[in-house]
Amino acid sequence: MDQQVINITEALIQKGAVIAFAVAIALIVQNVVVRLANKVLDASEVPNASIFINILRTAIWSLAFLSVLRPVFNVDPSGLIAALGVVSVAISLGLQDTISNIVGGLGLMLSRAVRPGDKVTVGTTTGTVTDVTWRSTTLRSRAGDVDVIPNSVLNKTTLTHLDPANAGICKVPFAVAPGADLDAVAEEARTCVEEALGADLDPEYRTGVLFCGITAYGTDGVVVLHLADGVGMPGARNRAVHALHGRPWIARAL
């Protein structure tokens, strides 16, 4: 009887030592891995980085738990791993799009491909990036429309970063009657359009007036506007056309 108690006590001590050793190793690995991951994520300015850290912690403690199953509980971990593998495959198939978006979002954040404030074109959508999350990227167009683009789509679509000088360009074509002084026309067109739009123009760039062709009706020209952030192009173009309308040098049909 005494020997049986001793054997049970020794077995419990051994199992306790195994658990304590596994916990100690898991804590050391967790501290090292989490510290390194925090440095990488802080440098990359990844939002909601705690989610990624929690995933790492869960993986470390799951491995620690599996390592003590056989020596402590006499349970073969291979069966549990196989069952978890089947479950994970089923989950991954059901959440394929979600997982693809999350992985794509992590790649965008780490590579800093897009950041809030960037002016970009994605496919046929142009706007300013307002938010980048794990699942999607949000763009706001100049017209005020908000487009939420899944990160998996963003990773498969051509992404164009717009130069600040080109992001707010709005072109207004017009035609000049034959015989008009083009220099005087350019100055008057620039002045009247700038007066019409006022503070809606970007003060960093000067309104341009270009002449690009000659037709039977006269000379083709275009006013190049640089709009301020948040100004819609249709409304700005409408005001510019009204400012140009009725000028004596505007070409008319014969």
Image: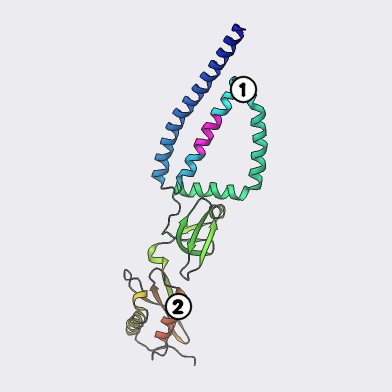
Q: In which image quadrant can residue 174 be found? A: bottom left
159 and 37: which is toward the camera: 37
Above-or-below relation of 24 to 248? above
Residue at the spot 54% in from the left edge and 58% down from the top edge: 149
Above-or-below relation of 176 to 33? below
Residue 33 position within the rendered picture, expressed as x and y whole percent measured from the top left? 45, 33
Residue 101 position within the rendered picture, expressed as x and y whole percent measured from the top left? 56, 50
What's the CA distance linking mark 2 and mark 1? Answer: 73 Å
> How many numbered badges does the structure rendering display?
2
Residue 73, numbered circle: 1
Residue 119 position within the rendered picture, expressed as x and y whole percent measured from the top left? 43, 61
Q: In which image quadrant can residue 167 be found? A: bottom left
Magenta span covers which residues?
Answer: 55-63
Residue type pointed to by label 2: Gly
Check residue 41 for magenta coloring.
no
Residue at the spot 47% in from the left edge and 87% down from the top edge: 217
Q: Which colour scheme is used?
A: rainbow
Residue for badge 2: 235
91 and 234: which is toward the camera: 91
